[in-house]
Amino acid sequence: MGEAVSAFVPGHITGFFTTQPDPDPTKAGSRGAGLTLSDGVSVTVRPDDATSIVLNDEAVEMAPVERVLDALEVTATVEATAAVPLGAGFGVSGGLSLGAALAANRVFERGLSTNELVTIAHGAEVQSGTGLGDVVAQARGGIPIRLEPGSPPHGTLDGIPDRARVEYVSFGELSTADVLTGETDHITQAGQTALSRVVSEPTLGSFIYASREFARETDLLTPTVTEAIRAVSEAGGQASMAMLGETVFALGTGLSDAGYDPEWCVTHPAGATLE
Amino acid sequence: MGEAVSAFVPGHITGFFTTQPDPDPTKAGSRGAGLTLSDGVSVTVRPDDATSIVLNDEAVEMAPVERVLDALEVTATVEATAAVPLGAGFGVSGGLSLGAALAANRVFERGLSTNELVTIAHGAEVQSGTGLGDVVAQARGGIPIRLEPGSPPHGTLDGIPDRARVEYVSFGELSTADVLTGETDHITQAGQTALSRVVSEPTLGSFIYASREFARETDLLTPTVTEAIRAVSEAGGQASMAMLGETVFALGTGLSDAGYDPEWCVTHPAGATLE
């Protein structure tokens, strides 16, 4: 058993999604599409007598990470650093769960496969109500299209064969759990329409257009987000809202051109990996 | 229509494989496992009146690449540079096919998805008799386990959640077509045994052990390859033979420690991408 093992998990901005509940957490999840980001989460797992989780130097409670360690039957100190904002639609929770699974499997020599670890992390997110589609997207990398919900072998992914510079500005948090425990039929209907568009035309332009339509139709836009998307559009760019956070993302230099002072990164070609 | 677009495809060393013929090329393929490599193939596609293919500055005929361009209904100049030896078990043919598909889709704005491009490149390899499992592995990256043959949605992949430094020495070429058109029942039987081992224990150690067993049982080893694998083993390392080439690969510094002067790279975390 080694001293400590680290994993990197790309961030994930969801452009649109459906909710697909199922009693089996490996079949539950969502359809949709998003961008994985070179800004992500680094997770270090160190065997310890009890489990504790530290995120950006602060002790935190994170139910899905605890579920992952329980599933692997280990206790450990999990230290994570997120290069993206928390609670703002970047998949930090999925990143910690998947990163903890990959690193713990290695440090405790559990001998599980990639698909098995993805399944554990996905199930932990679903059961904790913290996410539906981030983990499978973050395990793939690139620009994932989630065709069917769930983890392997149930979930099915495709991708947009492109890469991009991505700018983002976060104005605040939105609770994934609050939205997901409310009425979600209209979200799923709008998400299905957006998915059909992107499946028939799997390009970045089509993705961001479908995402913007989705944000509008689901009434998830806040005034600040609406204003930023409009400003990017008026400056000739393309932007939408990260699901679920009060966050605007744009392709290329969309937010800079509109006078914002965004963070920026690029789409991440790889899925989660040991460091 | 842009001027020229480039894609990078990781190299792929197959450790063991089965052959799974099927009249439908998207269902045909192989099971097995391998390492994708940071040494790979860069492919640039430039629209042109007729199709021509240049590999490492030499004009070549490559049936699968021509099939890919035909499927996309385009003609182009394809210029490729391979950082790995040709005909020696590194998936150069699959790399050119997949890279041409990705780059041509972009430069000609064909609007296909990643899975569709993988399917076109895989089918072109199968129909040309040049490969069975490289394309789907090279589209995934990492250390792919091919559970079920074929391209999406038929093929199923898992992975070994690890990464490694990889050394290799190539002593010569072996023709994939010659082996694949011969009697392959014993290969498939040995490949299935190796796969069972790696599925039950998806680790690098188990992969290289299973690969060595496979090479022995299929009588594909040449005297030079046998000697190199033995030398690495005696120096305390782990090596096997790349399928199909007169090539030995080792984890870590296995070949250096045994006194060889190998090339080296690392497993590639990402699948094929536009550059």
Image (tube, coloured by chain):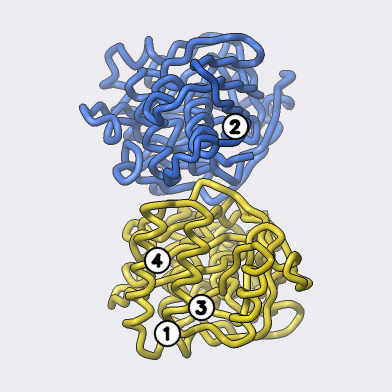
Chain colours: A blue, B yellow
Q: How crowded is mark 4: few (under 14 residues within 10 Å), some or many (20 or more)?
A: many
Contact check, label 4 and label 2, Cβ < 8 Å? no
Query: Which residue corresponds to the image point at 49% horizontal and 66% vertical from the top-left?
Result: B135
Q: Residue B64 carries which label?
A: 3
- The x and y percentages for residue A196 are 35, 41
Residue sitting nearer the eye, A93 or A157: A93
Q: What element carries label 1?
A: helix
Q: What residue type is labelled 4?
A: Ala
Look at the numbered disc 3 and give the secondary structure of its residue: helix
Amino acid type of the residue tagged 2 in the rendering: Gln
For residue A238, which numbered disc appears in the image? Answer: 2
- Judge the density around disc 3: few (<14), some (14-19), many (≥20) Cα neighbours within 10 Å: many
| Amino acid at pointer 3 | Pro
* Whether marks 1 and 3 lie on the same chain: yes
Give the Cα distance between marks 4 and 3.
29 Å
Under circle 2, the secondary element is loop
Q: Image height check: is B71 above or below A119? A: below
Decide if residue B101 is on the left or right side of residue A181: right
Residue A204 place in picture, x, y as percent: 54, 42
Q: Which residue is drawn at 31% across and 77% down?
A: B21
Of labels 1 and 3, the one closer to you: 1
Does label 4 or label 3 sit earlier along the sequence? 3
Q: Nearer the viewer, mark 4 or mark 1?
A: 4
Task: Name the residue tied to disc 1.
Answer: B180
Chain letter for the residue marked with disc 2 in the picture: A
